Image (cartoon, rainbow, N blue to C red):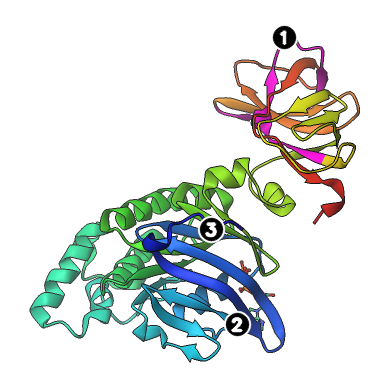
């Protein structure tokens, strides 16, 4: 995992963090920092430790090793556990966790008890406007849709002006379309306010759409902390390569530091690897690395096609029987069984030594 942010801009610093339940280690050696104003997603399969890491940052879980610092203040280490309510960290939960007996306005006002009644009213009105719920201020949670409830939960968490906002799978109870729309709205609101946030999700598209940085977790290890672009094009581990975006591995053998011999010829990328010549490797091929080229001697057979609007995703069988996937413009329509001329156009050549399969 590479640290990509300059020290001066970091708001949150998580250093060599370890979390356990009894003797079972569920987060190990987690290390990352979050810049002021950035939104990050913790992404990973079920049980990988996302919620545990989020709860440790919120102060609900003690840490066995390492430290968490916010704005230079030590919040957690094996001898320190600043209480959640003293961290100035807001939290939005999957099930919204609204108070059923309080109106929308009173839910939002809940964390503002230190303000005078007048100040509270002004702040609640600001937030109602921000999340576009002013017309529903006197309703109760059960009188709202799921999306509206989640907007109230967001407003309630933002009301006390937290230094950092944590969101635990906030859209998972919503249908796909609403999820997409609300995640964009939340991004806009957070960016407008300059709020730094960490969101847990297992949905890669959601992470890519929302986050400036994404941390990919697997089995308690933070495999990579990086921009969505780099996760897709420069995955640090085989797990990240598999988990983030579609892709296939094509077996090959190193020819020299930049070039691999494969069954479909030599592939040369724009970066050098230190593997010795003849080392067996797997080349990561994304669907956009395979292009149509009428002049190419390489032909693949169409196995399956999935129309996806402007693109069609093709599953192709290479002469060696290796299967890959490619996106072609949906105007180039091919039928299953048809032979198509293709060429590999992989500028970012991503290789993994074959023995290090996860
Ligand atoms: N209170 C607990 N006591 C013991 N083990 C726990 C506890 N909470 C979580 N775990 C275990 O810790 C590991 C990480 O759990 P965690 O909830 O952090 O994963 P997650 O990535 O958020 O999963 P999901 O996406 O399914 O919510 C899992 O193996 C889980 O079974």
Q: Give the number of the mark in front: 3 or 1.
A: 3
Residue picked out by circle 1: 294
Disc 1 on helix, strand or loop? Answer: loop
On-image quarter of the N terminus: bottom right
Q: Secondary structure at mark 2?
A: strand
Which residue is at a point 69% across and 30% down the rendered structure image? 269
Q: Position of residue 357 (x, y in %)?
A: 82, 53
Describe residue 308's horizontal placement relative to residue 300 as left or right.
Answer: left
**Ligand 1 closer than 8 Å to label 3 CB:** no
Looking at the image, tell me whether mark 3 or mark 2 is earlier in sequence order: 3
Q: Which residue is mark 2?
A: 65
Q: Residues within 10 Å of mark 1 (few under 14, many from 20)?
A: few
Q: Is residue 95 visible?
A: yes
Q: Secondary structure at mark 3?
A: loop
Give left or right: position of 308 versus 247.
left
Label 3: which residue?
Answer: 3
> Which contiguous range is marked in magenta?
282-309
């Amino acid at each position: 995992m590479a640290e990509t942010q300059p020290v001066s801009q970091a708001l949150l610093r998580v250093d060599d963090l370890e979390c356990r339940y009894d003797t079972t280690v569920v987060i190990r050696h987690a290390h990352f920092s979050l810049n002021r104003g950035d939104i990050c997603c913790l992404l990973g399969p079920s049980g990988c430790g996302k919620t545990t890491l989020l709860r440790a940052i919120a102060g609900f879980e003690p840490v066995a090793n390492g430290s968490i610092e916010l704005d230079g203040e030590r919040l957690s280490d094996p001898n320190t556990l600043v209480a959640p309510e003293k961290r100035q960290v807001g939290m939005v939960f999957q099930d919204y966790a609204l108070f059923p007996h309080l109106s929308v306005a009173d839910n939002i006002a809940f964390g503002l008890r230190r303000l005078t009644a007048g100040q509270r009213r002004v702040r609640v009105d600001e937030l109602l406007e921000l999340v576009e719920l002013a017309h529903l201020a006197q309703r109760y949670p059960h009188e709202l849709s799921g999306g509206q409830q989640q907007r109230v939960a967001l407003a309630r968490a933002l009301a006390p002006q937290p230094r950092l906002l944590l969101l635990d799978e906030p859209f998972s109870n919503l249908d796909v379309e609403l999820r997409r729309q609300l995640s964009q709205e939340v991004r806009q609101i957070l960016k407008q306010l300059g709020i730094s946030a960490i969101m847990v999700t297992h949905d890669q598209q959601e992470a890519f759409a929302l986050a400036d940085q994404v941390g990919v977790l697997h089995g308690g290890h933070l495999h990579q902390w990086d921009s969505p672009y780099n996760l897709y094009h420069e995955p640090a581990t085989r797990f990240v390569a598999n988990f983030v975006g579609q892709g296939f591995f094509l077996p090959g053998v190193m020819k020299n530091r930049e070039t691999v011999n494969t069954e479909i010829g030599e592939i040369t990328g724009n970066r050098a690897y230190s593997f010795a010549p003849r080392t067996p490797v797997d080349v990561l091929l994304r669907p956009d690395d395979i292009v149509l080229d009428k002049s190419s001697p390489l032909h693949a057979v169409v196995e399956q096609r999935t129309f996806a609007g402007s693109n069609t995703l093709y599953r192709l069988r290479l002469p060696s029987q290796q299967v890959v996937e490619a996106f072609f413009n949906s105007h180039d329509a091919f039928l299953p069984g048809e032979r198509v001329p293709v060429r590999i156009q992989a500028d970012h050549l991503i290789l993994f030594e074959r023995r290090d399969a996860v």
